[in-house]
Image (tube, helix red, strand yellow):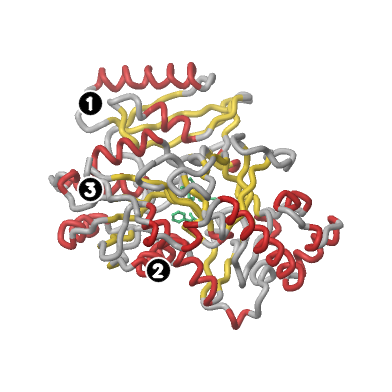
Amino acid sequence: MTRLGTPPTPELLDPAERLSRGQLRELQLRRLREMLAYTYTNVPAYRERFDQAGVRPEDCRELSDLARFPLTGKDDLRAQYPFGMLAVPRERLRRLHASSGSTGAPTVVGYTDGDLDTWSGAVARCIRAAGGRPGDLLHNAYGYGLFTGGLGLHYGAERLGCTVVPASGGMTSRQVRLIQDFRPDVITATPSYLLTLIDEFEKQGLDPRASSLRIGILGAEPWTAEMREEIEERLGIHAVDIYGLSELMGPGVGQECVETKDGLHLWEDLFLPEIVDPLTGEVLPDGEEGELVLTSLVREAMPVIRYRTRDLTRLLPGTARPAFRRMGRITGRTDDLIILRGVNLYPTQIEELLLRIPVLAPHFQLRLTREGRLDRLTVRVEARPDAGREQREAAAEALVRAVRDGIGVGVGVEVVDPETLERSVGKIRRIVDER
Ligand code: DLL
């Protein structure tokens, strides 16, 4: 494994990263109370919702009082499309981003100068926690555009003092060339796109492990510990997880520290996390798995109170940054839940199982079909390049067994030739629903 950067000395950290847990909680309460009042005054849609629920900003006297306020869903934001959630006049926005809108009206996110500043600061903090340092060369392969990944990482890296290569997603063979020629230290990409890049290195006859890269900052989609191992092994880097969502800002809500690699520290001076039961909305204690709900604590253009992320995880105590709680790896999104003959399963569970079978490559798709009244799931997965027919058959059987024993449901497995499944250039779509 490549050398691990030394942990940042205290003077390298942001003032907020040096707070004690007690000081951080005081800061959170002050900011939360201000944020509730600001939102109530400036966003009519929130004022109505608070009034309907019979709560006023001044009812929040301690952090746990937040549970009295209504939850906000994606539909609440969509209902205000495009600018109804803004707390400032449109002229004060410096930038707009939007979610893809593949499942309805897109959600629009606006940023003031102040918001862009907060965002760059948060992302700079992430890159540093991942082991990046001023002066590093950073190859940014997140997509540029309305998606927050490209520009979010870009300005955060500049803020930290890195040299940024704004590669964006796609044109993969050229990206390999740029990496060979510019010799970056850090790469930022979705894990699925980084795999595409690693494959391209090999296709060009290059050894990915011989590249200059030391660190990968990977996120925007669910990935497993097994996928981390695959990427670290093949590229010879430290791969760490970054989390965020456009509704709250973009990338930079949470980051895994390279020295511990034990889940993502949430920057709780900027975002207040809660975990709720996805069905009842009831707040769950730390350690229990449920849906992550986030409240912005520092935001001008578009404050969000108790936003339901649909992401499933749990809250854990801080480690490398002791004051900040961590969240476990996201196990899945409630939207990606597959219910197969009564059994719940997420694509990450399949990823975990198939990567333990050496003949299978980390490229897979889950195809849902219906036969009569029965739903059927077929895992289409590529074989590793050198696998023979018998090995493939044995691997398919092994995966069927692993899913039956591990998840408790029968699936079909089709092991396909290398390079037959569509490659990711950004966020990968694992589920193909043909029902
Ligand atoms: O994906 C922001 C981002 C860009 C994060 C680059 C990290 C790196 P959205 O397009 O709004 O924003 O999608 C947000 O992506 O609710 C999760 O479901 C998923 N997601 C993001 N990061 C992770 C992660 C960006 N590390 C949605 N692990 C979120 C698992 C993630 N899922």
Disc 3 packing (10 Å; few <14; some 14–19; many ≥20):
some
Q: Residue at x 28, y 59 (%)?
A: 171
* Count of numbered circles on the image: 3
For marks 3 and 2, give the CA distance: 27 Å
SS at badge 2: helix
Q: Which residue is drawn at 81% across and 64% down?
A: 48
Disc 1 packing (10 Å; few <14; some 14–19; many ≥20):
some
Q: Looking at the rendering, which quadrant does residue 40 occupy?
A: bottom right
Query: Percent position (x, y) of residue 174?
Result: 22, 59
Sequence-first tag of 1 and 3: 3
Residue lying furthest left in this view? 205
| Mark 1 Cβ inside 8 Å of ligand 1 | no
Q: Which amino acid does label 3 sit on?
A: Glu
Identify the residue under disc 1. Answer: 387
Query: Percent position (x, y) of residue 57?
Result: 78, 63
Asked whether residue 77 appears in the rendered view, the answer is no
Q: Which of marks 2 and 1 is in front?
A: 2
Q: Is residue 363 left or right of residue 252?
A: left
Identify the residue under disc 3. Answer: 200
For marks 2 and 1, give the CA distance: 43 Å
Choose between 119 and 83: the one closer to the eye.
Answer: 119
Identify the residue under disc 2. Answer: 155
For marks 1 and 3, give the CA distance: 19 Å
SS at badge 1: loop
Q: In this view, does 66 lie to the left or right of 314?
A: right
SS at badge 3: helix
